[in-house]
Amino acid sequence: TGPLTVGEFAKQLRKEASEVIRKLISFGTMAAINQEIDVDTMILLGEEFGIRVVYKEIVDESNFEELEEHDDPNDLVERPPVVTIMGHVDHGKTTLLDTIRESKITSGEAGGITQHIGAYQIEKDGRKITFLDTPGHAAFTTMRARGAKVTDITILVVAADDGVMPQTIEAINHSKAANVPIIVAVNKMDKPDATPDRVMQQLTEYGVVPEDWGGENIFVPISALNGTGIDDLLEMVLLQAEILELKANPEKPARGVVIEAELDKGKGTIGTVLVQSGTLRVGDAIVAGNHFGKIRAMINDRGRRIKVASPSTPVGILGLSDVPNAGDAFMVFEDEKKARAIASQRGLKEKQAAQGTQAKVTLDDLFKQI
Ligand code: GTP
Ligand code: MG
């Protein structure tokens, strides 16, 4: 199977389909006019006709979430892990996020105002970790539905006094489906009725098995409330990140995903985005979802104005024309005019898709005859 049928390919070559079919037979292949042929075969056929076939993929920039990144391995540098905290209701996700944030970012921060931008970054032993502060499940499902992989590591919070519950299982399923490693934080260890062994046993049934038991999951007993075990947990996150060898190329226009966005009466659209590759800069022309804009200002998770944001950095941005959805991809383009055109193309496609009238793909650009 390939991108063109015999008939379509013959047309591109300005030959009769029967001639192409005859050539194919001479290769030992019986093919009908509406059969698809692969690129290698097309190149061979072209040679037979004395025509050089150059395969040129149609690069549809408006589908930018599907564009593959081709980076020179030399341009790739280590990036911080992006961590999502998931778990059942009341098992301590918010408390854990707050404890981590308080223990790590307020110290030594002049002013120390923590801006809520839906994500934050801490430093542990000189290495950064990004935490997404979104309702884990929602982010996971919408983003996964869009094919975007946002999280590198899941911290699964399980209350030691309550054990495995429905949303614990849901979190395991989401993480496994997205191939995201799970670190289990066995929480509420300070409670007298905490039974961590039971949690371990229960999780084993769902394929989350402690390393000590021959599995591949790290378990860390913690108390999100009083801070016990938090350092260990962060160390384990860094260890897991090392194993994953997370890298990105910072030397190109930024791409990433929208974490959250809202309309502020005074400031316009305020979006929080996570830069996944490249570097985002004030002044960049950007498309997020079906909306475009020019970045007027960026703030980090501490409410400070910043000018650049590197891979794995969460950042608040001002300047989008309208409010994109959480989970939408964003990408920087060369100028505002281009961004506007891409955004409107995306809007149009969405409308067509909703009406069931997909835009026709033209084959004209597929081949260049020399
Ligand atoms: P939802 O956002 O509703 O799903 O809950 P959550 O998982 O964010 O739980 P949250 O952090 O709000 O904690 C729920 C309750 O458990 C709160 O009363 C916390 O104070 C308490 N809690 C969280 N962690 C601990 C802990 O380590 N020990 C004890 N004793 N209580 C805890
Ligand atoms: Mg919560």
Image (cartoon, rainbow, N blue to C red):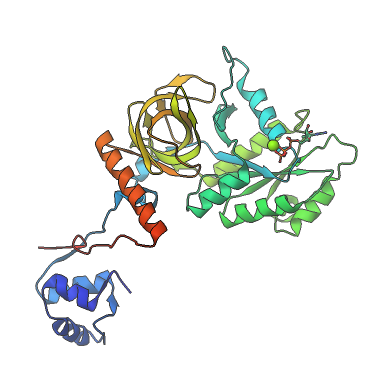
Q: Position of residue 117 (x, y in %)?
A: 54, 29
Q: Whole-percent x and y of residue 60?
A: 29, 53
Q: Is residue 136 above or below residue 306?
A: below
For the N terminus, the image quarter is: bottom left
* Number of marks in picture: 0
Foreground of the two, 257 or 219: 257
| Residue plotted at (43% across, 41% down) | 256
Q: Quadrant of ligand 1?
A: top right
Q: Is residue 153 left or right of residue 33?
A: right
Query: Which residue appears at 34% of the width and 61% of the height?
Result: 358
> Residue 269 in the image: x percent, y percent?
44, 30
The answer, for residue 220, to whether it is visible in the render is: yes
Q: Eyeballing the image, is 236 above or below 352?
A: above
Q: Quadrant of the C terminus?
A: bottom left
Q: Is residue 82 left or right of residue 102?
A: left
**Residue 216 shows in this picture:** no
Quadrant in the rendering for residue 154: top right
Residue farthest to the right, as pictured: 192
Horizontal and vertical percent for residue 255? 39, 40
Left or right of 222 in this view: 108 = left
